[in-house]
Structures are given as structure tokens and as C-alpha cells.
Image (cartoon, helix red, strand yellow):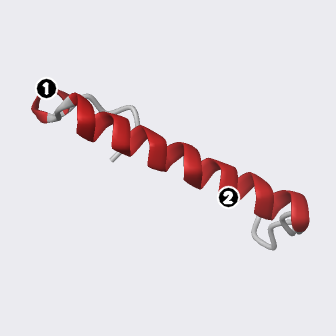
């Protein structure tokens, strides 16, 4: 499912949406930190 899916948004409370948004920002920060420490290696698959 895509992050921008609007499927069940009307069922989520503002508190749940805020918690999900906060977690998404935390995960984004972790990914950026890991990429800064050890850049991604080039793909070995087809171009």
C-alpha cells in the first residue's frame, strides 16, 4: 500500500494520524543518518 493512500483515512483519529506521522519522520531521520554514515552501494542488477 502506498504511503499516500487515502483508503481508510476517514477511520483514523487525529491522534493516530499524528502518531503515524511522527513515526514516519523518525524512520526518515534514521535512514538519512545511516546513508550519511555509510552511503548506499551501487546496485548489482541490470541498468
Q: Is residue 39 left or right of residue 12?
A: right
Relative height, residue 32 to residue 10 (above, below): below
Quadrant hosting residue 27 = bottom right
Q: SS at mark 1?
A: helix
Alpha carbon separation for disc pair 2 and 1:
29 Å
Q: Nearer the viewer, residue 20 or 35?
A: 20
Q: Residue at x 80, y 67 (%)?
A: 43
Q: Nearer the viewer, residue 43 or 14?
A: 14
Residue at mark 1: 10
Residue at mark 2: 30
Q: SS at mark 2?
A: helix
- Name the quadrant of the C terminus: bottom right
- The residue furthest bottom is 44
Camera-nearest label, 2 or 1: 2
Q: Is residue 35 visible?
A: yes
Q: Is residue 41 left or right of residue 17?
A: right
- The residue furthest front is 15
Nearer-N-terminus badge (2/1): 1
Q: Residue at x 78, y 58 (%)?
A: 33
Quadrant hosting residue 31 = bottom right
Q: Nearer the viewer, residue 25 or 7?
A: 25
- Dot 2 surroundings within 10 Å: few (below 14), some, or many (20 or more)? few
- Dot 1 surroundings within 10 Å: few (below 14), some, or many (20 or more)? few
Find residue 43 and name its label. none
Relative height, residue 22 to residue 37 (above, below): above
Residue 34 pos. (x, y %): 78, 64
Q: Is residue 2 visible?
A: no
- The residue furthest left is 11
Q: Is residue 37 left or right of residue 27?
A: right
Residue 29 pos. (x, y %): 67, 50
Relative height, residue 19 to residue 30 (above, below): above
Residue 14 pos. (x, y %): 24, 29
Amino acid at each position: 500500500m502506498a504511503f499516500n493512500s487515502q483508503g481508510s483515512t476517514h477511520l483514523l483519529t487525529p491522534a493516530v494520524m499524528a502518531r503515524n506521522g511522527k513515526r514516519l519522520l523518525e524512520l526518515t531521520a534514521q535512514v538519512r543518518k545511516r546513508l550519511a554514515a555509510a552511503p548506499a552501494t551501487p546496485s548489482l542488477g541490470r541498468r
